[in-house]
Image: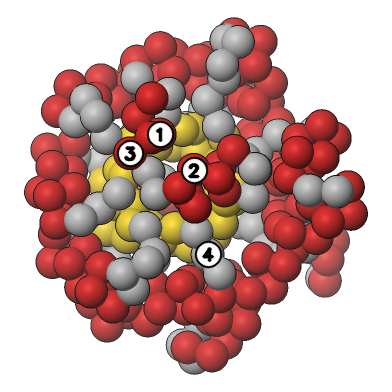
Amino acid sequence: MSRFTSLPPILRQAIAGRRLLKVIAGLTNFDQASVLSIARAAAAGGADLVDIACDPSLVKAVAAACPQLPICVSAVDPELFAAAVAAGATMVEIGNFDAFYAQGRVFSAAEVLELTRRSRALLPAVVLSVTVPHRLPLDQQEQLAVDLQAAGADLIQTEGGTSARPFSAGSLGLIEKAAPTLAAAHAISRALAAASPEPLPVLCASGLSAVTVPLALAAGASGVGVGSVVNRLGDPLAMVAVVRGLREAIEAPARLVGGGAGVAAQA
């Protein structure tokens, strides 16, 4: 866990306090104008981290536009990470895999584990987040998360929004949309806690909204990652408003129980 010392203090505190908010621009989104708009909204709305495609030019552009906002780069090719880190990325991530499912590309547990080992060998000192594919049965997701910790991952991310089939309107529909990733966060966080005295933090992502981010924290997550709820909006002001709403949704449970430590005690 010593690699976390390389993170900016505010980012470390967000993970430790179980209130991390990451805004995801998209692993396949290489449109600089779009990525910059999302990053600026993330910074203005109070996000702790922006997750962008693994491209050094994008990293430099976001770092110049939002110098106080840490950058995570996502890819499924470990050989791409080093250049992005040299350009200013704070951490790297394998996945998430949602963008590939429509293409028929499915990632096995063995493949994700091998990508993790390669990434760790290439970047021994860089914080590494790894997504657990939601297409795996929950028991296999749990085992993969445990194996990923042993292989050198620093954070585990869940997904599941693309498999959800909500059929209700309003808040109920939003909960139905988030159900797969919430279930994964609950199962994985408990599997990691049972397997290690120092379990990895879990980041719950994909299909979340302001209604469901408190549920993710209650399920055991140390933070949340949100993508389409922000990046599908074309209006910069609307994006900022959504990020602020997500920030408020994360902070509200902490205020109700007396702070981040109280949230951890409740989970």
Is 203 on the left or on the right of 170, as rendered?
left
Front position among marks 1 and 4: 1
Q: Secondary structure at mark 4?
A: loop
Q: Secondary structure at mark 1?
A: helix
Compare marks 4 and 2 and give the one earlier in the sequence: 2
Quadrant where the image shows the C terminus: top right
Which residue is outermost to the right?
256
Label 2, residues with CA under 10 Å away: few <14, some 14-19, many ≥20: some
The numbered dot on residue 12 is 2
Residue type at the position of mark 1? Phe
Closer to the camera, 155 or 145?
155
Residue type at the position of mark 4? Ala
Q: Is label 3 in contact with label 1 (beta carbons under 8 Å)?
A: yes
Compare marks 2 and 1 and give the one earlier in the sequence: 1
Label 4 sits on residue: 47
Is 109 on the left or on the right of 258, as rendered?
left
The numbered dot on residue 40 is none
Find the distance from the CA under tag 2 to the CA under tag 1: 7 Å
Q: Is residue 18 above or below residue 243?
A: above
Front position among marks 3 and 4: 3
Residue type at the position of mark 3? Ser
Label 4, residues with CA under 10 Å away: few <14, some 14-19, many ≥20: many
Residue type at the position of mark 2? Arg
Find the distance from the CA under tag 4 to the CA under tag 2: 13 Å
Q: Is residue 158 above or below residue 214?
A: above
The numbered dot on residue 6 is 3
